[in-house]
Amino acid sequence: MKNSLIKLAQKLTSEGPHKYQHTPRRVRGLFNGKYAFDTINAYHVWEHPYYPQFYVPISSIASSASLSKTSEVDGTNGGAHLAKLTVGDKSTSRAIIFSAAPLKDLVKIDFKEVDQWFEEDVPIYQHPKDPYKRIDILASSRPVKVALDGVTLAETTAPLFLLETSLRTRYYIPPTSVKWEYLTKSDTETVCPYKGKANYYNVTTEGKEYKDLVWYYVYPTSESELVAGHLCFYNEKVDIWVDGEKEKR
């Protein structure tokens, strides 16, 4: 784990981030029952092309918290140091302080190490939302059919199409249009910053079980509330027909 931080610091000091920009959002981090930082001067930093992380100014660290350098990162010419964040009796060493452009005077604290992140007064999960990404949920009358191993698993003329920037369309199906005899509950849970906490079902056909083939949201985020209770099958793992046309997996 420490090696991944070192490699990241070396990459960012030598090559710079994929992209970075100031965000006007208020960003706060709850750590051990206190806000370890609180700022309107955070940056979205894309360490890779897919989604950003929040980097916060060193000056935003609260008086109730302590941020200290632990060691210089080799190969950065003093441009990055591993750091330790402490609040009370809890601490994390999953942090980097930057002292060279373009991330000078910013600190990266591993997202999962913070108990809860907030954008303004809204909690965020998994990673920060990409400000260039959006979700549209559109009701459609185009029929959607889902099958696997020649067995029809669901069929509806009232699907919801979820269109998420840079991802393929997902088809959310009303629960009354699903053949429940093929589904069993899974213990798997995942979290999406755009849609919320997802739960899963396994699918069994022809005596073969397919793990976590279906997901659903009981309490999605406000921007995705239309899909609450609907079921979505992995396009990549089942056969789907939309308006009679079979999609490629």
Image (cartoon, grey):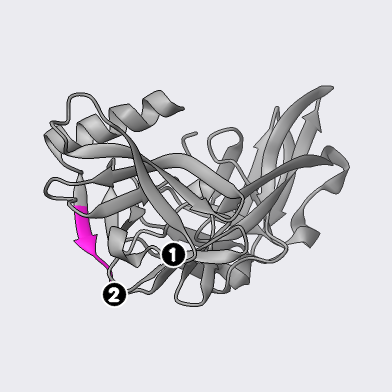
Rendered position, 105 above or below 70: below
Residue underneath mark 1: 135
Q: Position of residue 67 (x, y in %)?
A: 39, 51
Q: Let me know if residue 107 appears in the view.
A: yes
Q: Is residue 248 left or right of residue 240?
A: left
**Quarter of the rendering containing residue 184:** top right
- What secondary structure is marked by label 1? strand
Asked whether 43 falls inside the magenta stretch, the response is no
Rendered position, 175 above or below 4: below
Part of the protein shown in magenta:
20-24
Residue sitting at 76 percent across and 57 percent down? 177
Residue at far right of view: 181
Q: Nearer the viewer, residue 235 or 99?
A: 99
- What secondary structure is marked by label 2? loop
Total marks in image? 2
Q: Nearer the viewer, residue 242 or 44?
A: 44
Q: CA distance from mark 1 to mark 2?
A: 21 Å
Other-residue count near label 1 (Cα within 10 Å), few / some / many at <14 / 14–19 / ≥20: few
Q: Amino acid at mark 2?
A: Pro
Residue underneath mark 2: 24
Residue sitting at 61 percent across and 50 percent down? 89
Q: Amino acid at mark 1?
A: Ile
Residue sitting at 61 percent across and 62 percent down? 159
Rendered position, 60 above or below 114: below
Q: Position of residue 185 (x, y in %)?
A: 83, 43
**Quarter of the rendering containing residue 81:** top left
Q: Nearer the viewer, residue 23 or 151?
A: 23
Q: Which numbered disc, 1 or 2, marks the residue that appears first in the sequence?
A: 2
Other-residue count near label 2 (Cα within 10 Å), few / some / many at <14 / 14–19 / ≥20: few
Q: Are marks 1 and 2 in contact (CB under 8 Å)?
A: no
Residue sitting at 26 percent across and 29 percent down? 73
